[in-house]
Image (cartoon, rainbow, N blue to C red):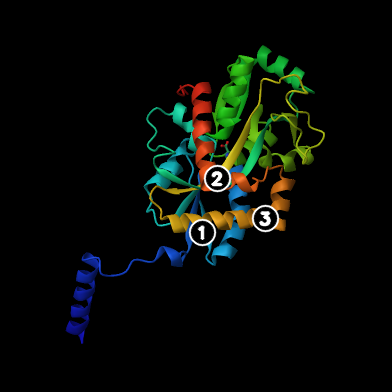
Amino acid sequence: MRSFSRILAAVAALAGAAGLVAPARAQDYPTRTITMIVPFAAGGPTDVVARIVTAHMAQTLGQSIIIENVVGAGGTTATTRAARAANDGYTLITGHMGTHAAAVPLYPKLAYHPEKDFEPVGLLAGTPILILAKKDFPAKDLKEFIAYVKANTDRMNMAHAGVGSVSYSSCELLSSVLDIKPVGVPFNGTGPAMNALVGGQVDYMCDQIVNAVPQINGGTIKAYAVATPERNPSLPNLPTTAEAGLPAYQASAWNAIFAPKGTPAPVLAKLNAAISKALDDENVRKRLLELGSDIPKAEARTQAALAALMKSEIEKWSAVLKPATN
Ligand code: ASP
């Protein structure tokens, strides 16, 4: 009996080595749990958007999607890991304007290239950037904020989620518009950075709206402006940067799912359809809208649209950001 099973095992090994054992068919995907890497700490904007959308995708796909928060280096540690993962559709990443665009000019030796090492799967949500400060920051509006940070630039602690993150890049843009050089204070995500802002340990931050709406409504932080051409329906009293006197500062992020390069097309198509279905779901929409996100319209949901967005964003940020020195 024992030798028979040994023979069976040997035959199976030979068949496998000769490629005779049929691999799991892409059409049957998914047949097991999917891992979604989130490149920042739990509770931050990337994590929140990923959790809202993937919870619905899991229902559509009939398999669980487990979120794995992998932190470090402004999201680039996790993105490197995702680039090197098996391209079978079981390891995905929720990346964003930072990991899949702004990180390129900031890290000349980046271990991955967003276009060469990933397949774009689908856009999840646009997230306008807000200028936020601790509750007792001595400025009542954006004009006063600008005057204060200019007068006290080297005493200002600006929180961000690491070089390459959305918060870092957005505040770098603000610094260049205002010609200031604050002290950057890195966190593993803007979830922990927001805790520090609420606690008054840092002075200000440029963050994605989904992380800030509950805090602004709760009165635990100050918000000066939303850096988009229009006000956001979730915060109707918050002026735009143009209204508040700083039209040159425009910033909005986006969050999207990517798969390692070479992931089979039918797998990508299934995932893309599951994202779109989630974005049409009433509860998913309600939660994303309450947090101020922009839900992509049909034409922005295709893989090709995400590829084009990533390309144009890499170009845009490459013109604005220089390799990081801190
Ligand atoms: N997405 C945020 C950023 O890049 C970080 C986070 O999600 O926690 O700043």
| Residue 274 seen in this snapshot | yes
| In this view, 240 is above or below 219 | above
Contact (CB < 8 A) between labels 1 and 2?
Answer: no
| Residue 160 seen in this snapshot | no
Amino acid on which the number 1 mark rests in the picture: Lys
Is tag 1's residue or tag 2's residue first in the polypeptide sequence?
A: 2
Camera-side residue of 276 and 50: 276
Is tag 3's residue or tag 2's residue first in the polypeptide sequence?
A: 2
The residue under the point 78% across, 29% down is 239
Q: Indicate which disc residue 280 carries.
A: 3
For label 3, the crowd category at 10 Å Cα-Cα, with few meaning under 14, some 14 to 19 and many 20 or more, is some
**Which secondary structure lies at badge 2?**
strand
| Quadrant including the N terminus | bottom left
Amino acid on which the number 2 mark rests in the picture: Ala
The residue under the point 28% across, 70% down is 21
Q: What residue does disc 1 label?
A: 270
Camera-side residue of 198 and 95: 95
The residue under the point 57% across, 34% down is 166
Q: What residue does disc 2 label?
A: 256
Rounded to the nearest angstrom, the CA distance separating label 1 from label 2 is: 15 Å
User: Where is residue 115 shown, x and y percent of the image?
Assistant: 43, 39
**Left or right: where does residue 59 sit relative to residue 243?**
left
**Left or right: where does residue 15 sit relative to residue 89?**
left
User: Where is residue 84 shown, x and y percent of the image?
Assistant: 37, 47
User: Where is residue 41 shown, x and y percent of the image?
Assistant: 55, 44
Amino acid on which the number 3 mark rests in the picture: Asp
**Left or right: where does residue 259 sit relative to residue 54?**
left
**Which secondary structure lies at badge 3?**
helix
- Ligand 1 shows up in the quarter that is top right
The extreme right residue here reads 237
